[in-house]
């Protein structure tokens, strides 16, 4: 249940199906800056169309990355997909990929996240099992361009002991985002006298998968929040916008000791980010 192919263009050509995930690996020398895709060599002996079901097998649940955004910085991110399926004969295996593009069945895709390893399946009964697929997404290779950030599709496959199988090219969607972070965050001076001015500064940055660096993220709304030392929740004090370089600066009046936080809520391409600094007020 392994797949491997290299591709010298951003769009995959040729008819492919998720059933190909069960084919042996085809060893190839992958260029680090091109997308990867899978070949169509189905183990069941035919090219299966998209969203095919043979027999009474059913996929009952899919949980990918704990149903959270897949956030990748400038290195790699490993996450799990759990596929639960049922069939009267029992479940033999399952697999899953995340893909980006127009159509998986025709090969019109420009991004693919998959595993080279077989799923590990826990059988809950004679008829049902949950299979874990572990995928690693690597910046600059799997995610060869920052343009791949955004909404991806989760394709899943399951096969029963008697050969029944089910394939869904778009079982659900998953957002794959670039990591956002703050650098140089500081609330000063500290300690500070009550009534004096506190200056809060920092820079919001966003990972580039293309260049493997973090760059200043401009024109983004960031909340300055505060939690008193005897409190348990943060309250928003004000909202400011990052400059053309991602820089942020604002001032507040010191009243009680507590923790100041820059909170960035993220968007369709960037993750949530937070930075903290405790200030003692005397």
Image: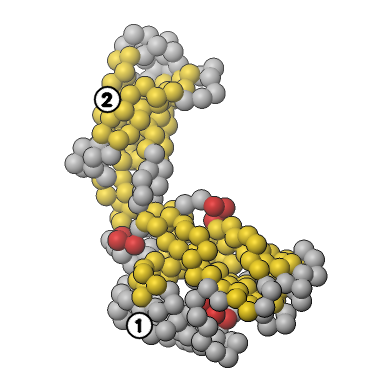
- Can residue 30 be seen at all in this image of the molecule? no
Pointer 1 local density, CA inside 10 Å: few below 14, some 14–19, many at least 20: few
Which numbered circle lies on residue 250? Answer: 2
Q: Position of residue 207 (x, y in %)?
A: 33, 53
Give the quarter of the figure containing the N terminus. Answer: bottom right
Q: Secondary structure at mark 2?
A: strand
**Which residue position is annotated with label 1?**
13
Given residues 30 and 126, the one toward you in this image is: 126
Comes first in the chain, label 1 or label 2: 1
Which numbered circle lies on residue 146? Answer: none
Q: Is residue 104 above or below residue 248?
A: below
Which residue is pictured at 39% across the width and 78% down the height?
107
Q: Is residue 59 left or right of residue 218?
A: right
Q: Give residue 86's quadrant in the image.
A: bottom right
Q: Give residue 218's quadrant in the image.
A: top left
Q: Is residue 9 left or right of residue 258?
A: left
Which residue is pictured at 53% across the width and 19% down the height?
231
Q: Give residue 244's quadrant in the image.
A: top left
Q: Looking at the image, what colour scheme do you see?
A: secondary structure
Q: Do residues under tags 1 and 2 come within 8 Å of each other at their CB atoms?
A: no
- Can residue 69 be seen at all in this image of the molecule? yes
Given residues 57 and 188, the one toward you in this image is: 57
């Amino acid at each position: 249940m392994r797949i491997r192919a290299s591709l010298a263009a951003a769009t995959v050509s040729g008819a492919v199906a998720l059933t190909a995930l069960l084919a042996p690996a085809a060893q190839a020398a992958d260029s680090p800056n091109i997308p990867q895709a899978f070949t169509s060599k189905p183990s069941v002996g035919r090219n299966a169309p998209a969203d095919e079901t043979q027999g009474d097998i059913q996929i009952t649940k899919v949980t990918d990355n704990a149903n959270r955004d897949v956030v990748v910085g400038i290195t790699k991110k490993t996450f799990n997909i759990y596929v639960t399926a049922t069939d009267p004969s029992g479940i033999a295996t399952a697999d899953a990929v995340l893909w980006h593009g127009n159509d998986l069945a025709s090969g019109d895709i420009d991004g693919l996240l998959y595993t080279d390893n077989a799923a590990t399946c826990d059988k809950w009964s004679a008829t049902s099992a949950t299979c874990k697929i572990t995928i690693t997404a690597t910046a600059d290779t799997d995610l060869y361009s920052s343009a791949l950030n955004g909404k991806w599709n989760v394709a899943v496959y399951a096969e029963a002991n008697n050969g029944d199988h089910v394939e869904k090219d778009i079982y659900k969607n998953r957002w794959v985002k670039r990591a956002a972070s703050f650098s140089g965050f500081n609330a000063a001076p500290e300690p500070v006298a009550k009534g004096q001015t506190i200056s809060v500064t920092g820079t919001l940055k966003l990972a580039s998968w293309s260049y493997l660096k973090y760059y200043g993220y401009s024109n983004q709304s960031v909340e300055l929040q505060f939690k008193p030392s005897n409190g348990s929740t943060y309250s928003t004090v004000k909202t400011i916008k990052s400059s053309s370089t991602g820089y942020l600066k604002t001032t507040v009046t010191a009243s009680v000791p507590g923790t100041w936080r820059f909170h960035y809520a993220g968007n369709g391409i960037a993750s949530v980010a937070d930075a903290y600094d405790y200030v003692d007020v005397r």
